[in-house]
Image (cartoon, rainbow, N blue to C red):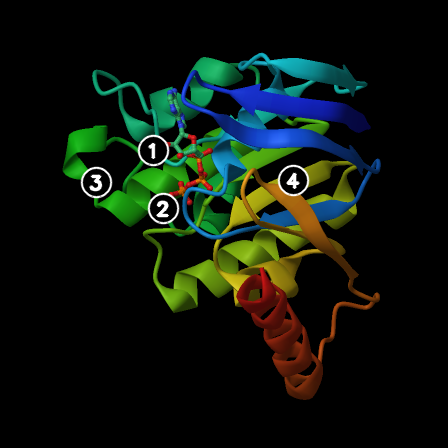
Amino acid sequence: MLKIENVSKDYGDGLIFESVSMQVKRSEILSVVGPSGSGKSTLLNIMSGILKATEGTLTSEAERLSYVFQEDRLLPWITLKENILFVRDDISDYDLTHLIDMLGLTGAENKYPAELSGGMRQRAAIARAFAYEPDLLLMDEPFKSIDYYLKSKIIEALIKVWKERTITIVFVTHDIDEAILMADRILVLGDKPTRIIKEISIEHPRAVSEREQLNIRKSIKECWEEI
Ligand SMILES: Nc1ncnc2c1ncn2[C@@H]1O[C@H](COP(=O)(O)OP(=O)(O)OP(=O)(O)O)[C@@H](O)[C@H]1O
């Protein structure tokens, strides 16, 4: 679905990445984990094409791309429902109601962004991204201000949508458990300039035992400590 080759990025203050190469396979859920400041958002911006790499190439087969940013980026002068319709005004009432319900937003349809909590706004941004029916969904720390219960519900919903449609998801997070819960494959970022220091594949069905989860978490932490 997407390939970056020998990508380097320098904002003018030194290299963030040097010669990073990676691929995103069609229909996979790929998680990129890394400490704060390791360049996760930068990498996602390069993948989306909104940021140009200093060197290297991006090849993307994505035709419909949705991007959930760290900030919700809702339009403040229209309601939650209108924000969703803004990207896709031909969505059926049934699908819209289902989407809003799936994200726990029933009852808030006609509220303006300023009337919603941070978590609700973030969920509205996720609903808007789903509504667009992307073939590639990029998400930057999408569950940051969402409580544990809702987060599990949204991850469940996301995996359901992912199973129903041919959708490729790349999401960045610094939360290892979140990555283990959702991803088929995890790329671990570290070092300076940043590089991919580890790659972990998670078997299907996604029923990772607590012990396995503990081992994966431990191995990621160990490779962060080693560098
Ligand atoms: N527009 C920019 N101009 C200059 N430097 C930038 C810009 N955007 C990011 N950086 C720098 O690039 C580095 C990586 O930032 P980035 O936001 O990609 O990391 P991150 O891993 O997503 O961080 P976080 O988890 O804290 O969101 C940081 O040192 C940051 O200060």
User: Could you tell me how far apart the alpha carbons at marks 4 and 2 are, in whole angstroms?
Assistant: 24 Å
Mark sitting earlier along the chain (2/3) = 2
Residue at 81%, 18% in the rendered image: 61
Provide the secondary structure element on which disc 2 rests.
Answer: loop
Secondary structure found at label 1: loop
Circle number at residue 116: 3
Separation (CA) of disc 3 from disc 4: 26 Å
Quadrant where the N terminus lies?
top right
Three-letter amino acid code at disc 1?
Glu
10 Å crowding of disc 4: few (<14), some (14-19), many (20+): many
Q: x%, y% of residue 71?
A: 34, 33
Q: Quadrant of ligand 1?
A: top left
Query: What whole-number distance in Å separates the C-alpha atoms at marks 1 and 3?
Result: 14 Å
What is the distance, in whole Å, between disc 1 and disc 4 at their CAs?
17 Å
Q: Which residue is mark 2?
A: 105
Q: Image height check: is 119 above or below 211?
A: above
Residue tagged 1: 71
Residue 85 lies, in percent from the top left, at: 45, 19
Amino acid type, callout 4: Val
- Foreground mark, 3 or 4, reads 4
Quick check: can you spot residue 91?
A: no
